[in-house]
Image: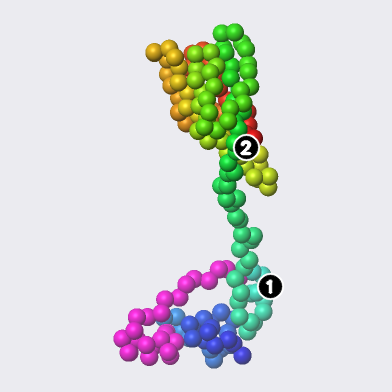
Amino acid sequence: MRPLWLALIGLTIGAPAWAQRPPGDAAPLQQQWQQDGAPPVQQAPLPPLTGDQQSAPGVAPTPAPAGPATMEAPSVWVPAKIAKVRALDKVDAQTETLTIAVGQSVVFGSLTIAVKACVVRPPDQPADAAAYLTVTDSHPDAPDFAGWMLKNEPSVSMMQHPIYDLSVAGCG
């Protein structure tokens, strides 16, 4: 016997001849609801049947599997207490890795580099680090910088300076 819910919504796929209705003919309960003033029941379209579902007469169709559900990893960052910033003097070609505590600042050449925050990814996610830096230059016409710098994507937020270049080397 067919499930009751199939008979109520008027599905006729694979149903015996006595259960089939002409297209557009409403189910008895739907007719009664329409007479009582209730809105008509709207039927959602069913997904196409797979080969084994089409060959079984009298069996209620089941939707084809949609595949595994995809789930994005949450954007989780863990705060760190120390930022490691790689500083490059383009004139002298000298590189120095600066270790700066969050909330502190250091001087590199004419730059004052302050670290406002440093965050890392947890161990179960791809390794990455980001630091929020505020950089000021003692030269009056030199550009300043304030923003997040990412270790794995340095081109997303770069400091534009004619003499110095900064990048995040990590957080600890």
Q: Which residue is mark 1?
A: 52
* Quadrant of the image occupied by residue 91: top right
Q: Which residue is mark 2?
A: 128
Please say if 146 is above or below 3: above
Instruction: Say which amino acid is labelled 1.
Output: Asp
Which circle's residue, 2 or 1, is located before the other in the chain? 1
| Furthest residue in direction top, as rendered | 92
Where's residue 83, x and y in %? Answer: 59, 31
Q: Quadrant of residue 67?
A: bottom right
- Residue 28 on image: x %, y %: 43, 90
Residue 118 in view: yes
Q: Which residues are magenta?
A: 25-49
Residue at 61% x, 90% y is 1
Determine the main secondary structure of the stretch shown in magenta.
loop
Q: Is residue 149 left or right of residue 65?
A: left
Instruction: Give the alpha-carbon distance from disc 2 to disc 1, as whole Å.
Output: 48 Å
